[in-house]
Amino acid sequence: GGSISLAGDEITGPGVERGMVFQQGALFEWLTVSKNVDFGLRMKKVPKDERAALVEKWLDIVGLQGFGDTPTYQLSGGMQQRVALA
């Protein structure tokens, strides 16, 4: 066996402070960038009145401001990965 460490701490299992991004697409290609990000927020039960601002915040953080209405299939692979991170 082996071990995994992050910033000097051994990782022994899943945690809320970590996420996962798939190498192959894990987005809904028929949805826009914003709707893909919103989907994750809905799954986390974030109230509807807070989601729009959070979508914009995360798109800004990952450098995709202005792409909210773009269907994800029109983005480059790297941009799709950033949507997944958001």
Image (cartoon, rainbow, N blue to C red):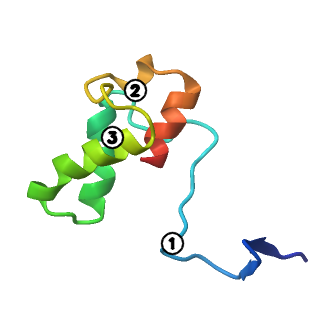
Residue type at mark 3: give it. Answer: Asn
Question: Which corner quadrant of the image does residue 15 belong to?
Answer: bottom right
Residue 5 lies in what quarter of the image? Answer: bottom right
Would you say residue 38 is visible in this rendering?
A: no
Q: Residue at x 75, y 81 (%)?
A: 10
Which mark is in front, 1 or 2? 1
Q: State the quadrant of the N terminus.
A: bottom right
Identify whether 2 is placed above or below 53. below
Q: What's under tag 2, amino acid-wise?
A: Thr
Disc with the residue nearer the chain's start (1 vs 2) = 1
Amino acid type assigned to the residue bearing label 1 in the image: Glu
Q: Position of residue 86 (x, y in %)?
A: 41, 47
Give the residue furthest to the right.
Answer: 1
How many residues crowd mark 3 within 10 Å: few (<14), some (14–19), many (20+)?
many
- Which circle, 3 or 1, is nearer the viewer? 1
Q: Which residue is mark 2?
A: 72
Q: Which label's residue is closer to the chain start, 2 or 3?
A: 3
Contact between labelled residues 3 and 2, with CB atoms less than 8 Å apart = yes
The residue that mark 3 highlights is 36
Instruction: Measure the C-alpha gap from mark 1 to mark 2.
Output: 26 Å
Q: Nearer the viewer, residue 28 or 9?
A: 9
Q: Which mark is residue 17?
A: 1
Q: Separation of disc 2 and disc 3 at Cα?
A: 8 Å
Residue under the image location 49 percent in, 38 percent down? 82
- Helix, strand or loop at label 1? It is loop
Residue 86 located left or right of residue 19: left
Tell whether label 1 touches label 3 (CB within 8 Å). no
Label 2 element class: helix
Q: Secondary structure at mark 3?
A: helix
> Which mark, residue 76?
none
